[in-house]
Image (tube, rainbow, N blue to C red):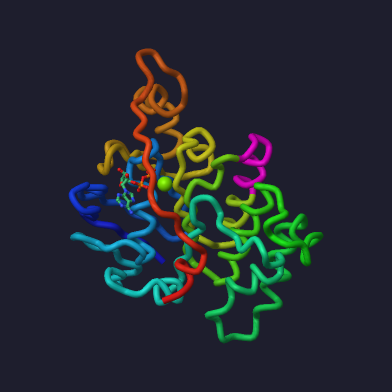
Amino acid sequence: MKLEIRDLKVSYGGIKALKGISLTVDEGSIVTLIGANGAGKSTTLRAVSGLTRVESGSITLDDKSLVGLPTKEIVRSGIVMVPEGRRVFPDMTVRENLLIGAYTRKDSGVEHDMKHVFDLFPRLSERTWQLAGTLSGGEQQMLAVGRALMTKPKLLMMDEPSLGLAPLVVRDIFEIIKRVNEDGITVLLIEQNANAALRVAGYGYVLETGAIVLEDTGASLMQNPRVQEAYLGKKKGPSAKVVSHKRKSDTPVELLAD
Ligand SMILES: Nc1ncnc2c1ncn2[C@@H]1O[C@H](COP(=O)(O)OP(=O)(O)O)[C@@H](O)[C@H]1O
Ligand SMILES: [Mg+2]
């Protein structure tokens, strides 16, 4: 299982969100894409998931093109995304949210996999019948990951899992990402929290306004002065420019439906 993105361009009307980016996610790895708000991180994941139209370039999974395929088929080929802001169904129970992750599956292993998710997240297991909307932020993030795992993915893509979570909870989430990867699932991790992301990722890419400006092993990027200054808070000059933006939200349904 290898994901390859080559010269990917995406525009929203006149705005060039991705100006031709290339990246590779090898089987079994944890790869991170870091960048400031508005850099194009979510756009990259949305393009891979078939949620955003690709203007040009290629996205392939083991040499099979994903461009133009419906999201449902991309999920079926083994790629799942945990969207920014988690987006669990608040009025459904933990169990119901997990079952939604499995709804495209026709095999009989669903209960077995649910048990595996509950082993991975004992906090969710204790809250099987609790409404998802009443979970803490960290628990909702665990549920969003659990729901994604219920699709039986080969590649798990996570959009800023640490956003809005307390440092201790962020640590838990990143521990879980490591465990999921040790279970054999490849991970593409999008983060503004470069510190946490580069610590778990074997390889990383730095995205700035729609272009990849640096790539290297996670350990080397941590030592890179440019990364340290702009993303690790070791600033000398003025702070890195942060572009704020607003756009319509994803719904969980959009991510699962065709
Ligand atoms: N649906 C959209 N319509 C118009 N512009 C968008 C839309 N989604 C994102 N953008 C713009 O594309 C750029 C990249 O956004 P995004 O991929 O969400 O960045 P990131 O996830 O790195 O914060 C930003 O300039 C943003 O304003
Ligand atoms: Mg984003």
Please state which of residues 171 and 99 is positioned toward the viewer in this rendering.
99
The residue under the point 59% across, 50% down is 178
Among the 4 quarters of the image, the one containing residue 111: bottom right
Which residue appears at 38% of the width and 20% of the height?
A: 239
Tell me the quadrant of the picture where the N terminus can be found.
bottom left
Horizontal side of 97 relative to 54 (left or right) equals: right
Above or below — where is 46 with respect to 168?
Answer: below
Name above or below for residue 153 compared with residue 32: below
Q: Could you say where residue 189 lies in the image, as x and y percent from the top left?
A: 47, 49
Which residue does the image show at 27% across and 37% down from the upper left?
213
Residue 114 occupies quadrant: bottom right
* Segment tinted magenta in the rendering: 165-175
The one of 149 and 91 positioned closer to us in this rendering: 91
**In the image shown, does 211 or 84 lie closer to the viewer?**
84
Up/down of 238 relative to 224, above or below: above
Q: Which sits in the foreground, 247 or 106?
A: 247
Q: Position of residue 194 (x, y in %)?
A: 47, 35
Question: Looking at the image, which residue sits at the far right?
Answer: 126
The percent coordinates of residue 251 (x first, y second) are 49, 62
The reply to whether the magenta stretch includes residue 144 is: no
**Would residue 116 appear left or right of 229 to someone viewing this image?**
right
Which image quarter holds the C terminus?
A: bottom left
In magenta stretch: residue 174? yes
